[in-house]
Image (tube, rainbow, N blue to C red):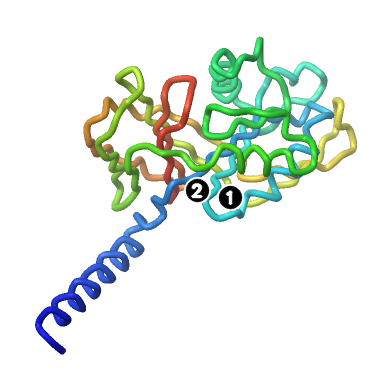
Amino acid sequence: MTGSKAKSGAMRLGAGAVLLALAATGTASAQPLTVVELFTSQGCSSCPPANANLIKVKDRSGVLALSFNVTYWDYLGWKDIFGREEFTQRQVNYEPALGRSGPFTPQVVVNGDADAVGARPGEIEGLIASSGRIKGPSLSLANGKIAIGAGKAPAGRADVWLVRYRQGVIEVPVARGENTGRTLPHANVVHALTKLGSWSGEAITLPLPADSGGLSTAVLVQSPGGPILAAATN
């Protein structure tokens, strides 16, 4: 092997070692993701088809699918067991930029800047295809830290959100309300949403809170009430 070839081979080995190290620490999952949020309710008779459509895409490579259960249909006779006021507020915050007069269910929001009802066959897949993956700062989760790279923050600031969700499908029997007698499946149900801080465009590192409840973790860097700039999972 000549000197130049040996040097080239060493560089390839070095790059391979870096990739292996990234995989070991969890940062290899920092590929650009398409974030699909379904706002749904167990008290809404129109939601089960959208729930089923989210299940179809939840394991797709490059897709982060999340179910946010809202609270404003609880008065119909069934209190959604996963519903949280902060999830309802998240949906409300989306509506002005999406051109909506108010929240409704079901509603699918992709990357924070495109939406659809999501109940028709193939509707979520079509929205994913037309939206593509997000492009923003680098973002990785490793060793109890959140690392956000430098970039451009729209309007000078973006929010950093911590999402805790139960990966997989959970089935919930509904005893009252519009879905009485039905057992409703839910994909990747969000249990907690916490704002960790802000990103102004400079590279920063934030502590990643530990979770002892067996939940999966996602972090979103997002323009307030608008596009998601970066997303990563553990």
Which residue is found at the position 21% from the left and 78% from the top?
Answer: 9
Which residue is found at the position 37% from the left and 30% from the top?
Answer: 160
- Percent position of residue 13, x then y: 23, 75
Q: Nearer the viewer, residue 219 or 71?
A: 219
Instruction: Tell me: residue 64, above or below residue 43.
Output: below
**Horizontal side of residue 220 vs 18, given as left or right:** right
Quick one: which residue is furthest to the left in this view?
3
Place residue 66 in its image quadrant: top right
The earlier-in-sequence mark between 2 and 1 is: 1
- Percent position of residue 48, x then y: 80, 37
- Mark 1 is on which residue type? Gln
Place residue 122 in its image quadrant: top right
Which residue is found at the position 25% from the left and 36% from the top?
Answer: 150
- Mark 2 is on which residue type? Ser
Asked if marks 2 and 1 touch (Cβ < 8 Å), the reply is yes
Quick one: which residue is furthest to the bottom in this view?
1
Q: Nearer the viewer, residue 195 or 36?
A: 36
Place residue 41 in its image quadrant: top right
- Percent position of residue 47, x then y: 78, 32
**Horizontal side of residue 46 vs 161, given as left or right:** right
Q: Nearer the viewer, residue 154 or 77?
A: 154
Give the quarter of the figure containing the N terminus.
bottom left
State the SS at label 2.
strand
* The label number, if any, that marks residue 167 in the structure image: 1
Classify 10 Å Cα crowding around label 2: few (below 14), some (14-19), many (20 and above). Answer: some
Q: Which residue is identified by label 2?
A: 216
**Horizontal side of residue 127 vs 52, given as left or right:** left
- Percent position of residue 108, x then y: 65, 32
